[in-house]
Each structure stands twice: as C-alpha cells, then as structure tokens.
Image (tube, rainbow, N blue to C red):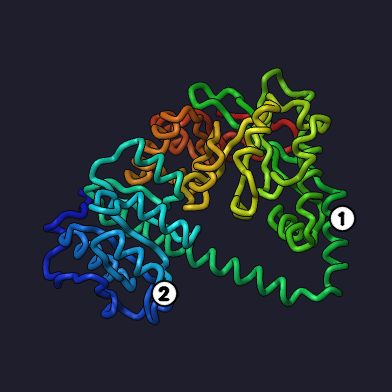
Amino acid sequence: MTTAVDESALVSSVPAVTRGADPGARAGKLALGGAEGSRGDILVVDDEPTLLRGISRLLTDRGYHVVCERDGEAALNTFRSKEFDVIVTDIAMPHMDGIQLLRQLREHDADVPVVLITGEPAVSTAVKALEYGAFHYLTKPIPLGNLEEVVDKAACLRRMARMKRQAAELIERTLPSASRAPLENSFFKALDSLWMAYHPILRAPDGSVYGYEALLRSKEASLPHPGAVLDAAERLNMLDVLGRTIRERSAGPMQNAPEGTVLFVNLHTTDLLDPTLMSPDTPLSKIAKNVVLEITERASLDQVKDVRARVAALREMGFRIAVDDLGAGYAGLTSFALLEPEIVKLDMTLVRDVHSSSTKQKLVRSMTQLAHDMGMMVVGEGVETAAERDALIHLGCDLLQGFLFAKPNVAFPTVKW
C-alpha cells in the first residue's frame, strides 16, 4: 500500500516549525550542493502547520536543507534574500495563494522549480500552473515516495541547469581562437555528410503509420552523434546554418510518402529567429500542411522575442507545433504554455516501465487527460516493449513511437506492431 502525506504519517515526533525556521540544520552530510553538507536548499510554504511540519521532516530526513514559511508574502521575502533549489508550496493559502506566489517567483527567477500541492485539483488551476512554468502539480493525499521523487528530480535539474550555464561560460572564456579552425573543419564535414533518418510514429488504436520524425545523422567521425554536431554549431555560432540544412534535407523524401503522411521536424529555439523559416519558397514550407515543427529547448524560449507572434505566423502557413519531453521539468512546461501546441510528447522517463509503475501510470493518465481537454494529441515516445505499448494505449495516448516498432533509418523503415 502506498503511504500518503497526512497528519499521522508526518507529524509524529516533529518539533514545531516557526516562520523562517530551518529544520534542515540537522540533516546528514551529503555532498551535493545547497547549504554546506546538504543535497540542496528547499523552501516549503503552507499555512497548515501540520502538513508544513510533515513535509519539512520528510525532506530533512532526505538530506535537504529546508526553510519553512506559512504564507506567500513571507515566502517571497525569504526567496529574495536566499537562493533555493526547489520551492514546494500549497495552492490554497490566504492573502497570496500558491499560483500568485508562483507568478511572483517567476518575476525574480525564471528557472527555479516550483512544486504545487492542492487538495482540490482543477483543470483551470493546472493550466495556470503550466502557464507560469510550474515544475510539478501534486494532489493530496500525497504519496511519500512521489513527493520525494519529484523533489529529487527537481533539485537535480536545478543543479544541472547551473552546471550547464557554468560550462558554457567556461567554454566561452577558454576556447582559443586557434581551436576554431579544426572545429569548423569538422562541422562543415558533418554538414556535407549530413543525412536524415526517419522514425515512424504510429496511431495507438491500430498501429498504422501517422507520420515520421526526421532525425539528424552525420558520417563525420570527429562529431560522432547528433548532440556533438549541435554543440559544434552552437560553439561556432552556426545554429542557423545547421537548422537550414536540416529543414531542407528533411523534406526531400516526403514526395514519395503516402498521401497525408505527417513529417515531424525538430527545431532549436533559435530557429524561430531565422527569417528563412517563414519563407514560403523553402522545401518545408511547400508541404507545411503535413509538417509538425517539434520545438526542443536546448536554449530557453526567453531568448526569442515575440514567441507567440512567430508561432502564429507559422500556423498561418499551415505548420503545426509539438512540444517534446512533457514531464521532464519546468523547461518543458514553459514551452507548453508559450507555444500552445497541437501535439505533445511525453518524456521517455515516464514511458520507461510505465506498465509496472502506478505512479507513472497516474502521471501519464492525468497529463493525457489534461492535454485532451485542451485539444492536444499525445505521443508516448521511447516505447521499447509490448507491455509499455499496451499500458500507454490503455492510458489514452493517441500516438506511439519507439524502437519496438522500428529503428530510425532512411526513408522509410519497415514498421512492426
């Protein structure tokens, strides 16, 4: 039986928590960021003292440094004076509720993961949570394991985001001009040998082909995988060159595809700034009504001005929009709110072993229902077993993609169901 957060489960032997209290001071020594010796700094906000004590005790026992506040205003003041890895807040609070707090937090920090807790889930509240980039949305009673898992993942993503920024800054500072030439040479060789592999996306009810995702491939040995090619393009400030090449070559085989076949093409967020994306004369634009632009977040959408207007212009041309990795974190949810996609792809971590995890099943079912309420199709991505396939069908996914059905290959690989 799954244990849930309630008074009896969390309050026993827990000392009273006062405003701004720091129950994490006695946490075990774990070398992972946050306050010295802690796994990270967590701000917990709830006007119910019992639940506040329980959550703080739980997270302190997990090795986190926990600070507690009983209302949104106090939490906001504490947040302004200290950097936190994760915010856990109740939604129903007097004066400033959790959604209002989330909105205020976003004005100071666009990235900090915020976990919202509610005893009265509603689609309207969930939509607002997505709009302001909530990391996760939990309903009471909260399974202990679920809360721990969500906070652990949020803290890891926060640390990863920091490390990526530090690495990018370090590379920018230390990359000597002399090293640019060999990297440029490798990059242009990769462009010359670039080809697109196509991975089928199937309709869940019957396994028929709905479309194909075009995936970057290259024969350049010094840039052995797509991520290496993208990193080289980013370091050389040539993402626009790579993006144009990918879009041009993705469209080619579609002239031989069956009528109505849909093509999924990945865009870097900076591709939205490329004027050629809007040109009606490109190969991709000419088949726009059969193209889904799948926007990934290697860079923040905050770097793109007028995102909504640009996406609206693409829709006018006939393109549809998809968001990848829904459920992977606050970044994906930010894209979800800004882009209002027609199609969403569940993060592969939710799909893996979904048939044997009641928590994952609950998340997938809830996310799928919410997407359907907003008129969006849902893709279960990364399917590797028949058990995962059957579970995703049962949970309401519209489309499926994964190695179970075919591996990416030249247009178009044979599919098995």
Tell me where residue 165 appears, x and y as whole percent: 60, 67
Numbered circle sitting on residue 311: none
Tell me whether the residue at label 1 lies in contact with that at label 2, contact meaning CB atoms closer than 8 angstroms: no
Residue ranking furthest to the top? 259
Q: Decide: few, some or many residues near mark 1? Use Cα within 10 Å; few <14, some 14-19, many ≥20.
A: some
**Residue 414 visible, this angle:** no
- Per the image, the residue denoted by label 2 is 34
Question: Which quadrant of the figure has residue 407?
Answer: top right
**Residue 387 visible, this angle:** yes
Tell me where residue 369 appears, x and y as whole percent: 39, 32
Numbered circle sitting on residue 189: 1
The quarter in which the C terminus is drawn is top right
Q: Amino acid at mark 2?
A: Gly
Residue name at image x 56 percent, y 39 percent: 339
Which label lies toward us, 1 or 2? 2
Residue name at image x 32 percent, y 52 percent: 98
Mark 1 to mark 2 CA distance (whole Å): 43 Å
Q: Amino acid at mark 1?
A: Lys
Tell me where residue 197 appears, x and y as whole percent: 72, 40
Foreground: 69 or 2? Answer: 69
Residue name at image x 49 percent, y 44 percent: 326
Residue name at image x 18 percent, y 57 percent: 48
Foreground: 18 or 285? Answer: 18
Q: Earlier in the sequence, mark 1 or mark 2?
A: 2
Horizontal relation, residue 138 to residue 8: left or right: right
Horizontal relation, residue 416 to residue 70: left or right: right
Q: Helix or strand or loop: what does disc 2 sit on?
A: loop
Q: Decide: few, some or many residues near mark 2? Use Cα within 10 Å; few <14, some 14-19, many ≥20.
A: some
Q: Helix or strand or loop: what does disc 1 sit on?
A: helix
Count all numbered tags in the image, as a single digit. Answer: 2
Question: Which quadrant of the figure has residue 89?
Answer: bottom left
